[in-house]
Image: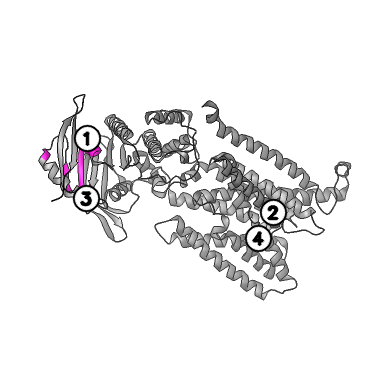
């Protein structure tokens, strides 16, 4: 049974729809990757699911085996308690401590006039530690590098403990090592409990290796749905070449024997 | 590592404490400054004239200086945070020009200081409500829409003010309109202020209770929404509340320049953070600035001078000093 399903989503800016009549599902414990060229509607899709963009169509969240929730019918407060969103770039532009940024994630659980409890502060510190930022709690968020900022926002998302994670290029500013660390962390976290993730990833290699399913978007429509762990290479190669130009795929093993997918750019004919 | 983690909160507390001490000293000086000489012995021995001046004039003037400055500083902090713009101040959405037009109408058509205050308050409120109503016409609810609507209302109010000035009798009415606009705490007595101060105080308490939401509003709109903030409604509530505090003050005092812009910047440059403590410090700095300026306005020349002269005169060098100091450290 799928934890999240979107039914015929249409969304856009002004009258021109960017995303047209999209339907897809995500199973519990799974991460769905969104791949597509620039302007194919990845961010628009995520924003529509969040309810930030007005849209047609419906999103269903299977709250538990009895209860299914329609996200569009929820008040922002309730919605934000269930779904966490990592924007491409956080808009926080004031001088504020790293810990305070993470504590913002608890806002949906707090009354308007309430303050974060000691327990929440502890959870926030733990989330920072998980993201590899232990000891930076009191530093000025603005003085961090873009990559570190993304890790802080990741910690905020983990602390908020939503069911559905919506990630818009959460790793775009991270260097090689931290990209993998972040994806490991996200995958592990989604695997625990009743959770699912939808991620537009900057790097297709990460998407191929960490997402359970891939939704290939072109001009706001679903081109193909791939399951990187199962699908034959030639099928995936064909579909990915439609987006990225000629590419080839190979399965390799790393030193520990773990199978990885590698994508190489081929010369255009 | 340890000392650096404790530093920001300690700094904020230290600055707030120092600011409060300075404010108490200034308040004491303010109570004993003015045309009618007061002395501690005179008050203690129960001189009736001295007691009357002290209770009806000096206390209310000092209280308005402190609370007014505090309100301007706090509201400035809220505006700059919500609009994510260091130049934002309550004037942006037309509260000051609305108050001026209201006061001018009051001076022309009504009589008595209380009526002018009321009329100024009504003008301020009308301007702000008009600006927010105009901005709500645009469904996307962007910050920039509010600013644009505010600018439109501001120029409308300026036009109304100009028309009122044209019809004013140049000898008497025009002079008092001009004097009102320049701003002064002169003529404030305990009879006219209680309603304004009470409302101002209630709004200030509400703002401090909402400080977490105010900081959340500084995030991008979609992000704030996904952090559980009903952005449109919360922003409206916060802006309306902070503008009310300013309306309460300017309808009593006339326009006071610079405090709302400068005090929160001072607080941020000193603490290098944005927390409830910074907001408090912004308020305290505003109170210090206005009380200090008012003392000078009463004592420098034989006649009372507009208080805005001194808020700018004290404030500008302080801001420049902070900027230079910040540069050297960075």
Quarter holding the C terminus of chain B? top right
Q: According to the image, label 2 marks what residue? A: B313
On the same chain, marks 2 and 4? The answer is yes
Q: What is the chain letter for disc 1?
A: A
Image spot of residue B297 (x, y percent): 75, 55
Image spot of residue B173 (x, y percent): 72, 70
Does residue B207 lie above or below B110 as drawn?
A: above
How was the colour assigned to the protein in this rendering? one colour
Q: Is residue A18 left or right of residue B241?
A: left
Mark 4 nearby-residue class (10 Å; few <14, some 14–19, many ≥20): many
Magenta span of residues: A205-233
Q: According to the image, label 4 marks what residue? A: B118
State the mark number for residue A22: 3
Q: Helix, strand, or loop for circle 1?
A: helix
Does residue A195 lie above or below B61 as drawn?
A: above
On the same chain, marks 4 and 3? The answer is no
* Mark pair 2, 4: CA separation: 30 Å
Q: What is the chain letter for disc 4?
A: B
Residue at x 31% of width, y 42% of height: A166
Image spot of residue B196 (x, y percent): 65, 53
Relative depth, front residue between B330 and B142? B330
């Amino acid at each position: 049974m799928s934890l999240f399903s979107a039914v015929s989503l249409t969304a856009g800016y002004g009258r021109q729809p960017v995303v047209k009549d999209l339907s897809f599902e995500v199973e519990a414990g799974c991460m769905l990757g969104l791949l597509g060229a620039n302007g194919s509607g990845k961010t628009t899709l995520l924003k529509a699911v969040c309810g930030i963009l007005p849209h047609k169509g419906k999103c269903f969240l299977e709250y538990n085996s009895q209860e299914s929730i329609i996200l569009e019918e929820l008040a922002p407060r309730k919605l934000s308690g269930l779904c966490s969103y990592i924007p491409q770039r956080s808009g926080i532009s004031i001088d504020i401590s790293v810990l305070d940024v993470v504590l913002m994630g608890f806002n949906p659980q707090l009354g308007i006039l309430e303050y974060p409890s000691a327990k929440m502060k502890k959870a926030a510190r733990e989330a920072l530690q998980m993201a590899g930022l232990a000891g930076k709690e009191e530093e000025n968020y603005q003085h961090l590098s873009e990559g570190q900022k993304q890790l802080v926002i990741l910690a905020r998302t983990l602390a908020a403990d939503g069911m559905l994670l919506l990630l818009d290029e959460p790793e775009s500013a991270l260097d090689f090592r931290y990209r993998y660390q972040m994806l490991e962390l996200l995958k592990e976290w989604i695997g625990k409990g009743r959770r699912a993730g939808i991620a537009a990833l900057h790097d297709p290699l990460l998407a191929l290796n960490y997402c359970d399913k891939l939704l290939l978007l072109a001009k706001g429509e679903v081109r193909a749905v791939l399951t990187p762990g199962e699908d034959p290479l030639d099928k995936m190669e064909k579909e990915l070449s439609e987006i990225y130009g000629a590419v080839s795929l190979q399965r390799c093993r790393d030193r520990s024997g773990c199978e990885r997918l590698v994508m190489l750019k081929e010369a255009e004919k | 590592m340890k000392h650096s983690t404790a530093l920001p909160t300690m700094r904020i507390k230290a600055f707030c404490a120092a600011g409060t001490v300075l404010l108490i000293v200034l308040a004491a000086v303010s109570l004993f400054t003015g045309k009618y000489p007061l002395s501690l012995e005179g008050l203690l021995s129960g001189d009736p004239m001295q007691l009357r001046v002290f209770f009806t004039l000096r206390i209310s003037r000092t209280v308005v200086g402190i609370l007014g400055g505090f309100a301007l500083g706090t509201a400035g902090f809220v505006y700059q945070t919500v609009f994510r713009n260091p130049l934002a101040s309550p004037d942006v959405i037309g509260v000051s020009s609305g108050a001026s037009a209201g006061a001018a109408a009051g001076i022309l058509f009504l009589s008595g200081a209380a009526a002018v205050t009321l009329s100024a308050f009504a003008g301020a409120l009308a301007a702000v409500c008009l600006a927010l109503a105009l901005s709500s016409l645009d469904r996307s609810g962007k910050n920039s829409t509010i600013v644009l609507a505010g600018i439109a209302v501001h120029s409308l109010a300026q036009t109304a003010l100009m028309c009122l000035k044209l019809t004013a009798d140049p000898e008497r009415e025009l002079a008092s309109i001009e004097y009102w606009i320049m701003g002064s705490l002169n003529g404030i007595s305990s009879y006219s202020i209680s309603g304004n101060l009470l409302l101002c105080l209630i709004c200030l308490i509400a703002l401090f209770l909402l400080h977490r939401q105010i900081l959340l509003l500084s995030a991008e709109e979609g992000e704030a929404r996904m952090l559980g903030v009903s952005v449109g409604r919360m922003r409206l509530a916060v802006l309306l509340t902070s503008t009310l505090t300013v309306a309460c003050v300017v309808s009593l005092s006339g326009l006071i320049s610079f405090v709302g812009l400068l005090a929160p910047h001072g607080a941020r440059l000193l603490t290098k953070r944005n927390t409830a403590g910074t907001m408090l410090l912004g308020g305290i700095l505003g109170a210090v600035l206005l009380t200090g300026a008012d003392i000078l306005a009463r004592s420098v020349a034989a006649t009372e001078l507009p208080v805005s002269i001194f808020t700018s005169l004290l404030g500008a060098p302080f801001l420049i000093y902070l900027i230079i100091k910040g540069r050297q450290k960075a």
